Image: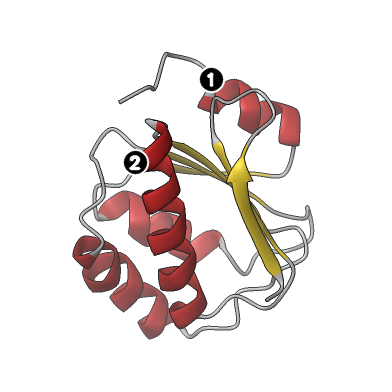
């Protein structure tokens, strides 16, 4: 297992640190585990640290993930998801677009401080 999912030190968000290439199956597994932990801890903000993870899926697979797989997870519409990537990695750009178009509150960042500021803008406790 090349990822970790835990409550952040601040207790305000769930941290997912991924150290392997991102696939549709991995994204679904991460989402399931993170949503379970968030539900258990009454947290609905998520930071996906993808700086060591390249999205290797096709455009079609990313579209299906956003429009079918994510809907099966029955996510809370109040969830906020920050995706933190390396500045030179554009492999996650399309999935951010299709997730936003599917109605999810997702934003891509290359600066961790900006991602945390965005996640913590409002009280996001369930």
Residue at the top extreme of this rendering:
122
Around disc 1, counting alpha carbons within 10 Å, would you say few (fewer than 14), some (14 to 19), or many (20 or more)? some
Residue assigned mark 2: 39
Label 1: which secondary element: loop
- Give whichever of discs 2 and 1 has the lower sequence position: 2
Label 2: which secondary element: helix
Q: Between residue 86 and residue 35, name the one nearer to us.
A: 35
| Residue 113 x/y as whole percent | 73, 27
| Residue 120 disc label | 1
Q: State left or right for residue 64 relative to residue 32.
A: left
114 lies above or below 89: above
Around disc 2, counting alpha carbons within 10 Å, would you say few (fewer than 14), some (14 to 19), or many (20 or more)? some
Residue at the front extreme of this rendering:
40
Numbered marks: total: 2
Q: State left or right for residue 87 relative to residue 38.
A: right
63 lies above or below 30: below
Q: Quadrant of residue 28?
A: bottom left
Which quarter of the image is occupied by the N terminus?
bottom right
123 lies above or below 25: above
| Residue 45 disc label | none
Whole-number angstrom distance, CA of label 2 to CA of label 1? 18 Å
């Amino acid at each position: 297992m090349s990822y970790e999912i835990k409550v952040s030190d601040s207790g305000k968000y769930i941290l997912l640190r991924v150290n392997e290439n991102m696939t549709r199956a991995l994204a679904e597994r991460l989402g399931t585990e993170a949503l379970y932990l968030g539900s258990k801890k009454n947290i609905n903000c998520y930071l996906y640290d993808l700086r060591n993870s390249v999205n290797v899926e096709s455009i079609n697979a990313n579209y299906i993930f956003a429009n079918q797989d994510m809907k099966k997870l029955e996510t809370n519409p109040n969830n906020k998801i920050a995706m933190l990537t390396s500045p030179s990695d554009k492999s996650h750009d399309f999935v951010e677009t299709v997730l936003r178009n599917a109605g999810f509150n997702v934003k891509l960042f290359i600066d961790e401080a900006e991602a945390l500021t965005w996640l913590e803008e409002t009280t996001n406790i369930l």
